[in-house]
């Protein structure tokens, strides 16, 4: 009987590993019954352009049902709710309690008030913990002041909402290990984004290493943070991308962003298990740059697995 029990347990482990491998290879989320798996969810893959198909930049790393957010682009709470409806149950809006901001550009932070107040109104009853480059503490302070009328009405009016759930613990952080719990270690590293102080983040979970670039030109610190990482999520702007309102775009791109050719070189040096392209320049309506073009530009010199990320993709 003992040998039969041991055989059944061993068979269960084998089945679990097969399921994990098959779903990971397909870029799909695991069923809710499979525990202990890290899910990477693209909540928003867009740029500052108000693109109805692409919400503002935001990514969730969900470990054992606990979500950790990177960036708070416009629409973050609704995109999390959409992911929840698709089966990522860790992304219930009230569960959004830990976030990391790459930099303070508006397209990465205008969803921050949404993250604070929508999660509170929808049931968050513990402090929201937020980590980012210097300035995130001041931004938090002034957001709370700007919404003071709303706070007063919801806590002192008929709603009688608990102010404890409104608390935000914001932290200006320096590069290095900035967060750790039983499920994840998060390391911030500096990236090159023009004159703006910006970070990328490395997430080490029990089963996966996920690196998120944020906005950056090619960065040695990112390369050093992602040697053979499981997932690298990186921005890119095609060589053919040219905004009409920036005559100095090529000079700007060199300092602030990464081309697909440069990203291919980064991937060749780091060899990630999966390269996900997000926050890409799509172009103006009628002159959009296709996913196929991005893939072709990267695959000129990179032969590893690469996908063009779409909102609500789960890997």
Image (cartoon, rainbow, N blue to C red):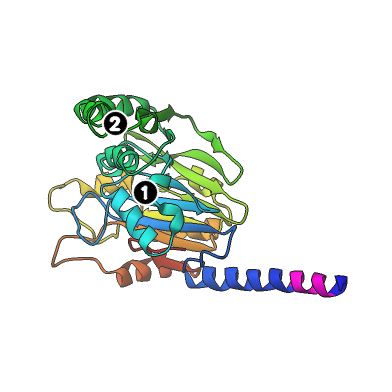
Residue 136: quarter of image? top left
Answer above or below: position of 161 versus 203: above
**How much space separates mark 1 and mark 2, taking CA atoms?**
20 Å
Answer above or below: position of 220 versus 171: below
| Mark number displayed over residue 93 | 1
Q: Residue furthest right?
A: 2
Q: Nearer the viewer, residue 289 or 154?
A: 154
- The span picked out in magenta is 4-10
Q: Is residue 262 visible from the viewing direction of this image?
A: no
Instruction: Determine if the magenta segment contains residue 7.
Output: yes
Answer with left or right where residue 205 lies relative to residue 40: right
| Mark number displayed over residue 249 | none
Q: Main secondary structure of the magenta part?
A: helix
Is mark 1 in CB contact (under 8 Å) with mark 2? no
At 58% from the left edge and 60% from the top edge, which residue is drawn?
35
Q: Nearer the viewer, residue 54 or 288?
A: 54
Q: Nearer the viewer, residue 212 or 24?
A: 24
Label 2 neighbour load within 10 Å: few <14, some 14-19, many 20+: few
Instruction: Label 2, secondary structure: give it.
Output: loop
Answer with left or right where residue 190 lies relative to residue 1: left
Residue 293: quarter of image? bottom left
Label 1 neighbour load within 10 Å: few <14, some 14-19, many 20+: many
- Image coordinates for residue 174, horizontal then vertical, percent: 48, 30
Query: Circle 2 sits on which residue?
Result: 160
Residue 286: quarter of image? bottom left
- Image coordinates for residue 97, horizontal then vertical, percent: 43, 41
Q: Is residue 104 visible from the viewing direction of this image?
A: yes
At 57% from the left edge and 64% from the top edge, which residue is drawn?
34
- N-terminal of the two: label 1 or label 2? 1
Instruction: Label 1, secondary structure: give it.
Output: helix
At 36% from the left edge and 42% from the top edge, which residue is drawn?
123
């Amino acid at each position: 009987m003992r040998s039969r029990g041991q055989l059944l347990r061993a068979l269960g482990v084998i089945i679990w590993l097969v399921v994990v491998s098959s779903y990971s290879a397909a870029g799909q989320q695991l069923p809710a019954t499979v525990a202990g798996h890290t899910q990477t969810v693209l909540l928003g893959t867009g740029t500052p352009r108000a693109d109805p198909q692409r919400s503002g930049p935001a990514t969730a790393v969900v470990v054992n049902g606990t979500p950790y957010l990177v960036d708070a682009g416009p629409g973050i709470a609704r995109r999390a709710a959409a992911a929840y409806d698709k089966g990522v149950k860790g992304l219930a809006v009230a569960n959004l309690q830990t976030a990391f901001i790459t930099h303070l550009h508006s397209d990465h932070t205008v969803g921050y008030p949404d993250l604070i107040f929508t999660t509170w109104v929808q049931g968050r009853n513990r402090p929201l913990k937020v980590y980012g480059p210097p300035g995130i503490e001041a931004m938090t302070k002034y957001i709370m002041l700007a919404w003071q009328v709303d706070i007063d009405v919801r806590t002192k009016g008929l709603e009688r909402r608990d102010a404890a759930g409104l608390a935000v613990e914001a932290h200006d952080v320096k590069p290095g290990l900035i967060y750790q719990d039983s499920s994840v270690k998060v390391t911030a590293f500096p990236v090159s984004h023009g004159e703006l102080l910006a970070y990328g983040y490395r997430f080490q979970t029990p089963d996966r290493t996920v690196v998120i670039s944020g906005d950056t030109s090619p960065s040695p610190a990112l390369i050093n943070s992602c040697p053979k990482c499981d997932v690298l999520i990186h921005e890119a702007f095609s060589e053919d991308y040219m905004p009409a309102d920036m005559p100095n775009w090529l000079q700007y791109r060199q300092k602030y962003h990464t081309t697909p050719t440069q990203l291919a070189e980064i991937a060749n040096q780091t060899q990630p298990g999966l390269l996900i392209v997000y926050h890409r320049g799509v172009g103006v309506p009628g002159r959009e740059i296709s996913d196929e073009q991005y893939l072709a530009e990267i695959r000129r010199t990179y032969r590893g697995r690469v996908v063009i990320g779409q909102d609500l993709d789960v890997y």
